[in-house]
Image (cartoon, coloured by chain):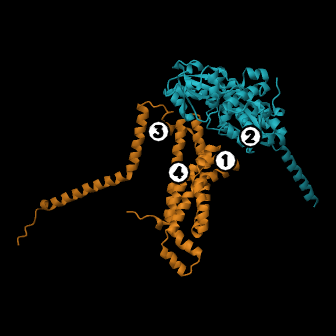
Amino acid sequence: MNHTPAPKAALHAPQQSHNSKTTASGVKQWFKKQGYRFAPWLFFISLLILWESICRLGHVPTYILPSPSSIINAFFNVSFSRWMVHLWATLRVALLGFIVSILISIPLSIALIRSELLNRTIYPVLVVIQSTPVVAVAPLIIVLMGTGDASRVLITCLITFFPLVVSTTTGMLETPQELIELSQSLRAPRYRETWQIRIPYAIPHIFSGLRVSITLAIIGAVVAEFVAAEQGLGYFIQFSTSFFKIPQAFAGLVFLSAISLLLFKSVHWIQAWLFPWSLPKKK
Amino acid sequence: MLNFVRSSIIAIAIGSCTAAMAADHVTFQLDWLPGGDKAPVYVGIQEGFFRAENLDVKVATGRGSTDAITKIATGQADIGMADIGALMAAKAQDDVPVSAVAAYFTQAPHAFFVLSNSGIHNIKDLAGKKVATSPFTSSNAFLPLVLKQNGLSDKDITLIKADPGALGPMLMTGNTQAIIAWVTNTALYKAQAAQAGKTITVLPWSEGGLSLYSSSIIASDRFLSERPEVAKRFIKAFEKAVVYTYAHPEKAGEDLHDIVPEVDPKIAAAQIHSIYDLVYNKISQSDGFGVLTAKRLTTTWQYVAKANDLSPDSLNPEKIVNKAFMPTPN
């Protein structure tokens, strides 16, 4: 056997080519990864640039469509303390309404699951409440309950509770029948069946409901502020519009959306923290 | 023991003194959001007119005259500001426990706003033109009356309805030849027109023949009967605040801004300047500030009844006023 040693260059050439190929594909992979990571931001920034260009090049007056830069200016023209006053007023009502909603919805769902009679009696009423436009009822609630936080919390509750009731009830009904039968055969008390079988099965559904409700809570607080309030982001937007300060109204709107997004994410974080097993597995 | 009794007596005495010195709480209901036309109540707080009368005044914002009347009727506020026409319409249909106590605008604030280069110089020139209004303004009810007084009818104009915030832009962009709004917004529309490099002309309906009472001070009957002295002190202080507001619009704008930081003091001052004629005019000069006369109340009611399609006999307009609290005529 003639073992002629291969020239070093010949030996290294394919290796080098392989390495450079690997590096090239690594770089490509890196760009792809970063592109995937930053795509939403790039898209968002491109949209802002397009919006700004349309406003500037088209000389669009701010009262028709304010440019992003004029909205940012308007945002900083309002003092930090005033933003905090309005933010706290809205957040207080939204969170209180949301918490009251949870306290009502979950026990109500348990009651609806347990009693067919209650289900037949109360469920239609809940549907009627949900079908009634809260915007139309809000002025009546203010008249009945006064202009304090209580009426605003009730308005928020009316908007937020229904998705929670529906999702909790659906979640509890989706518990595998064999588990229920097993617990019954072991003579487990009803409360254990609810807390240890039905509720854990309903957790993903409950959190889906919570995610919908938290954004509705902000909408509820704003609706209430449109009817009667002296503070709050909804009041601020209405006030700015009444003075034709459109960029300022947009700034309030953007702030409100940001808060809504943050609350939405917070529900996700709470779920990941308390019930990580209930989250869908990542691909 | 003696020491205990002595200190108890001193404590009770201090407590009673504090109670005697505590200011009377009054909630004032606005019929809309804070602005130049609502400045007097804020001026009264900032300049100490209410404090001098031992009053602690809280201001609640409103969302229209009907909203203000409802909140006063249901006891959420003691006294406030609303269109007297809305109170007349409410009283004609239901026994609302609210009474008018003083006039504020003795002329109606309704007006047409047009671009200065539109060729429209008076209400008659609106024939064949497109006019935009907001869906829920009380002006809409009076529109047929002011058109009739100027020899026109509903059919002579094309009326379109849009959100109040859209009216200004519609006028500036030529989507409509005229808009209906209150003269209280003159400064805001002028600023908007300046941004578009245009100027606007205001055609007040009061100059087009529609002469009637408008924004007035109204109070709950319960407040007037249970705390009459407080009500009298409030009205006295409010009157001083109105005088101060219109004598010092810039300072009034700053007073308003101090309580409601979102209000631009310059815009508020400009608003006060632009509505001076609604408060101080021939009517207020001849009858006295705040006075609601039987004759003008009757005229106002005739307009309101026609505008709202109510029977003229359904209300005695004089009955809606509690004269015991009205400022005294000159």
Q: Earlier in the sequence, mark 1 or mark 3?
A: 3
Residue A220 position (above or below residue B271): below
In 3D space, how far apart are the residues under numbered discs 2 and 1 (Cα atoms)? Answer: 17 Å
Q: Amino acid at mark 2?
A: Asp
For label 4, the crowd category at 10 Å Cα-Cα, with few meaning under 14, some 14 to 19 and many 20 or more, is some
Name the image quarter holding the N terminus of chain B.
Answer: bottom right
Q: As rendered, which of B109 and B243 lies closer to the eye?
A: B109
Tag count: 4
Q: Badge 3 sits on which subunit?
A: A
In 3D space, how far apart are the residues under numbered discs 2 and 3 (Cα atoms)? Answer: 50 Å
Question: Helix, strand or loop at disc 2?
Answer: loop
Q: Badge 1 sits on which subunit?
A: A
For label 2, the crowd category at 10 Å Cα-Cα, with few meaning under 14, some 14 to 19 and many 20 or more, is few
The colour one sees for chain B in the rendered image is cyan
In 3D space, how far apart are the residues under numbered discs 2 and 4 (Cα atoms)? Answer: 43 Å
Report the residue at 52% width, 73% height from top: A197
In 3D space, how far apart are the residues under numbered discs 4 and 1 (Cα atoms)? Answer: 27 Å
* Res B46 visible: no
Task: Find the residue positioned furthest to the left.
Answer: A2
Do the residues indicated by labels 2 and 4 lie within the same chain of the protein?
no
Can you give x and y, in whole percent of width and height, for residue A188 in the image? 56, 79
Chain ID for orange: A
Name the residue tied to disc 1.
A140
Do the residues indicated by labels 2 and 3 lie within the same chain of the protein?
no
Question: Helix, strand or loop at disc 4?
Answer: helix
Q: Closer to us: mark 1 or mark 3? A: 1
